[in-house]
Amino acid sequence: MSAIFEEGSALRELTRENEKLRKIVDVLMKRVERSTDAQGNAFSLFQAAIILESTVRERTAELQSLNDRLSDEIEERRAIEAALQVAKAQAERANAGKTEFLAAASHDLMQPLNVARLFVDAIAERPLDGPTAQMLERVARSLESAEGLLRTLLEMSRLDAGALRAELTDFALEPLLHHLASEYGLAAEERGLRLRVVPCDAVVHSDRGLFERIVRNLLSNALRYTERGGILVGVRKRGDCARVEVWDTGPGIPAQSLGDIFREFHRLASPNRGEDRSPGMGLGLAIVDRIAPLIGATVDVRSREGRGSVFSVTVALAAGEAAPAASADRAGEAFRGRTVLIVDDDGAALDGMRRILRGWGIDAIAARSVDDAVRFSLGRCELPAAILADYHLLDGATGFDAIDAVRASFACAKIPAIVISGDPSEATRRRAAQRGFGYLAKPLRVERLRSLLAHMLSAA
């Protein structure tokens, strides 16, 4: 019995020992597992650190390479910008040089044309037989073409250089439009076209000379492209603006070309109606487009192929009324029995001008220098009714000097005076205006001289 009891006790003791060993083994296994996990995490961290360091080195190298490339590009851009600045400065100097050359040479370029124009106009006022009149008309046309070409080139140069400045005044549109209509009317009749101007009473605020240039170019363009029918010039008032419209019955302009016609040297095909028809240079509308912003005007065009075109220029209406232009009869009354002193160092121009004035009933006295003008003044008691002085005179003197000397000789600062110049610079025109002088550009147009001189003599 006791033996059984002892065996049972030993079995329980073994069971407890076995349980204790199992617990110890479990504890030891857990420690081993924890130790293994700890070592595994450390190794993973070590591997991650190595990978990160490699990535950082690669990214650093890439950033350095990118930075080097950016530095090279910056240096290259700086070099390009410097080269562009040099090129721009050279272009500006070249453009300024071109403008200065044209300004300096314009007098020499315009003077022969001016002399020829004066003699042609003087001859045209005499009775001529049919063939002679036709030949003279052809000469006049050739001179007009040469003048137009030279004036256009000079004008483009001034526009490119920003040297053209507007002088805004109030003036009536109807006299200007009728003057242009009479000027272009003969050319229209010769081509079997009718040119008509609708009467208007609009007075606008703009630069008269530049506005006339725009309308003149639009009329010239209409004549060039119209083969049959006619041209109509009218004015519409819209609010505080006036819109001058030039309608033609030409071939019209394709819709895809409307955006191109104001570009330089862009010309559409025009009908060929004989040797007298010039194809033009493709600069007329380009000049219109550039002048318009200078005088606060806008230019528009509407056209239908086969039906014609309408070009319009819109300017501001004036607040007041403009002085009416002198009529031909009033001009004749103002001229008769008057003495006008002409100062010009070009003998041919002097002779041509004298013939023109004498044809108007004016006693024209010629002087070739400031000293000659002063000698004339000292030798006469009668004041000249007006002084016409070329701007460029001998020995660097100017028309301003001649006018001042003559006025001083007579102790009279109110003798009307007109300066005539082939210089395209606006400075001369502005100086003349500041001094109260009239101004006419070469080549001289006789009708403008007649109108301005009549106005000054009537107002004196």
Image: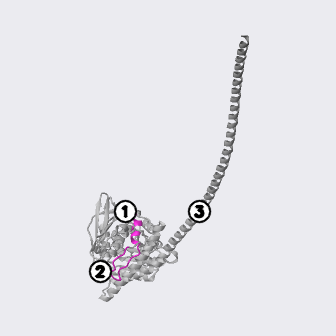
Q: Residue at x 70, y 36 (%)?
A: 39
Majority secondary structure of magenta residues: loop
* Nearer the camera: disc 2 or disc 3: 3
Percent across and percent down for residue 1 are: 71, 10
What amino acid is found at the position of numbered circle 3 in the picture? Ile
Q: CA distance from mark 3 to mark 1?
A: 39 Å
Percent across and percent down for residue 423 are: 46, 73
Q: Residue at x 71, y 12 (%)?
A: 5
**Mark toward the start of the polypeptide (3 vs 1):** 3
Q: CA distance from mark 1 to mark 2?
A: 32 Å
Left or right of 113? Residue 51 is right
Residue 289 within the segment the image draws in magenta: yes
| Callout 3 touching callout 1 (CB < 8 Å) | no
| Residue 397 visible in the snapshot | no
Q: Residue at x 51, y 74 (%)?
A: 101
Q: Residue at x 67, y 45 (%)?
A: 51
**Mark toward the start of the polypeptide (2 vs 3):** 3
Badge 1 is on which residue?
298
| Callout 2 touching callout 3 (CB < 8 Å) | no
Q: Rate crowding at label 1 as few (under 14), some (14 to 19) or many (20 or more) other CA atoms within 10 Å.
A: some
Badge 2 is on which residue?
190
Q: Secondary structure at mark 1?
A: strand
Q: Quadrant of residue 210?
A: bottom left
Badge 3 is on which residue?
80
What amino acid is found at the position of numbered circle 2 in the picture? Glu
| Magenta-colored span | 268-292
